[in-house]
Image (cartoon, rainbow, N blue to C red):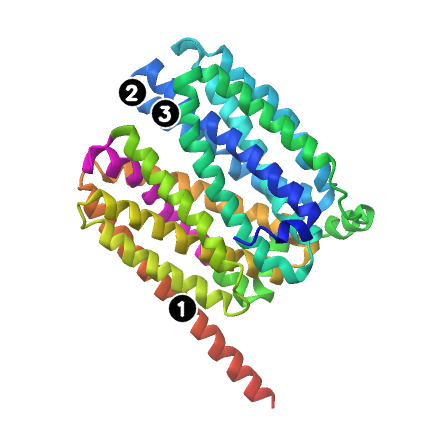
């Protein structure tokens, strides 16, 4: 992980720290809310509804968030969404009985809506704050940020809740939103001519922009397909992590924390490799998908905890490299004025698919063993990567034919 880049990119440094503060606090709250719901209801049904509720807003607010990021001050969007979420982060303090579960559902919906608006604004801000030559390195750091949030939030959140109670978690989450907003307020964002941008966008609808960008760039087409397919597979993975820990390895909550910790560490360490990449981003990312598939096949067959932890670490390591490659492609290929809209639409499409995949995978476990589902998932990763590699090969051949006919 090239931390030294944070010294060179002072403005991004603050955005990076704000991301850690914001993300860890949100992870804290997610762990505490799910635990609270299960304790109140005694079943996982309400917890499943809570998770599903967090997916729904992305369908509506993903495109809105992307459009807002392209029309208005991204700095103001980031600060405002953080400040609004403070109120709803604290609302969980008022949940005492089953009758109060409506507060959980409403607040979870609003918090997810805030995230749907926040994400495209933050992501499209990164290329504006950094030197273009540092995009690959910064995208590697973004993967490290995901790992840090996963380790610091999901694991530590359970520990803090068990010692101080869930109330403390909700106060910490509110404080994290406030702290992130304060940090972002100190960043001098580059000025954009929002009046001209608004005039340009008046003539273009969201999906017209999406169609135009997709058509002009073959790499973006491939990454779009990857985004859809990987969301389908990731839903299965998210369900299987807990099932493997509890039912297959009989480790309970400790196992869940152990496996998530391995994932977080793998994503964090991946930045050491991804920030050294300079070319062949598309094929490197697709190669990582094949490796992930192979590891998932191994995971479905082994019975040693130590090996399982190593495989979860390796899965996240290669996933982090692949994600950094694909994010770099998008930032290089998509014009800056449309990045908010495009990142918003990618979020809109992938998150509902992820939620649906989790529900389908959970239902599938009623009819098949976890290891069978895991084996199918591994084959799915490999098949998905080969499909995309075939698409790349086809696009390359078509381009070569067009160029030869031109001459």
Which quadrant of the figure has residue 384?
A: bottom left
Quadrant holding the C terminus? bottom right
| Tag of residue 47 | 3
The image shows residue 112, relative to residue 37, as above or below, that is below
Mark 3–mark 2 CB contact (< 8 Å): yes
User: What is the total number of numbered labels drawn onto the structure image?
Assistant: 3
Q: How many neighbours does mark 3 have within 10 angstroms: few (below 14), some (14-19), or many (20 or more)? A: some
The image shows residue 188, relative to residue 154, as above or below, that is below
| Tag of residue 389 | 1
Query: Residue at image x 36%, y 43%?
Result: 262
Between disc 1 and disc 2, whose residue precedes? Answer: 2
Horizontally, is 338 left or right of 329 in the view? right
Report x, y in % for residue 390.
Answer: 39, 70
Which quadrant of the figure has residue 48?
A: top left
Q: Which residue is mark 2?
A: 43
Q: How many neighbours does mark 1 have within 10 angstroms: few (below 14), some (14-19), or many (20 or more)? A: some
Q: What element does badge 3 sit on?
A: helix
């Amino acid at each position: 992980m090239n931390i030294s880049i944070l010294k060179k990119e002072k403005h991004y440094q603050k955005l990076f720290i704000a991301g850690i503060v914001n993300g860890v606090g949100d992870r804290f709250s997610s762990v505490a809310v799910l635990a609270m719901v299960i304790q109140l209801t005694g079943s996982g049904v309400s917890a499943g509804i809570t998770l599903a509720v967090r997916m729904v807003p992305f369908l509506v607010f993903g495109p809105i968030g992307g459009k807002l990021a392209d029309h208005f001050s991204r700095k103001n969007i980031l600060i405002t969404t953080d400040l609004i979420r403070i109120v709803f982060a604290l609302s969980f303090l008022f949940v005492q009985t089953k009758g109060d579960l409506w507060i959980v559902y409403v607040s979870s919906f609003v918090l997810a809506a805030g995230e749907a608006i926040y994400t495209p604004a933050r992501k499209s801000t990164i290329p504006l704050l950094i030197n273009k030559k540092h995009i690959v390195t910064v995208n590697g750091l973004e993967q490290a940020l995901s790992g840090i949030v996963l380790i610091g939030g999901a694991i530590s959140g359970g520990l803090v809740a068990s010692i101080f109670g869930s109330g403390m978690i909700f106060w910490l989450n509110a404080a994290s939103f406030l702290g992130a907003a304060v940090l972002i307020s100190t960043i001098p964002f580059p000025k954009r001519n929002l009046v001209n941008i608004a005039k340009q966008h008046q003539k273009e609808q969201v999906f017209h922009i999406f169609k135009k960008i997709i058509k002009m760039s073959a790499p973006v087409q491939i990454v779009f397909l990857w985004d859809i397919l990987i969301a389908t597979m990731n839903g299965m993975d998210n369900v299987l992590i807990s099932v493997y820990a509890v039912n297959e390895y009989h480790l309970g909550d400790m196992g869940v924390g152990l496996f998530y910790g391995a994932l977080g560490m793998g994503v964090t360490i991946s930045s050491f490799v991804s920030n050294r990449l300079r070319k062949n981003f598309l094929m490197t990312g697709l190669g990582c998908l094949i490796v992930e598939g192979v590891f998932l096949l191994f995971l479905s067959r082994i019975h040693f905890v130590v090996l399982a932890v190593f495989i979860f670490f390796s899965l996240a390591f290669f996933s982090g490299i692949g994600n950094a490659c694909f994010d770099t492609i998008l930032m290089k290929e998509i014009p800056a004025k449309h990045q908010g809209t495009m990142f918003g639409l990618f979020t809109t499409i992938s998150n509902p698919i992820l939620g649906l995949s989790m529900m389908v995978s959970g239902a599938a476990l009623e009819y098949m063993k976890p290891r069978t589902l895991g084996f199918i998932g591994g084959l799915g990763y490999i098949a998905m990567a080969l499909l995309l590699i075939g698409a790349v090969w086809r696009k390359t051949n078509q381009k070569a034919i067009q160029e030869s006919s031109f001459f």
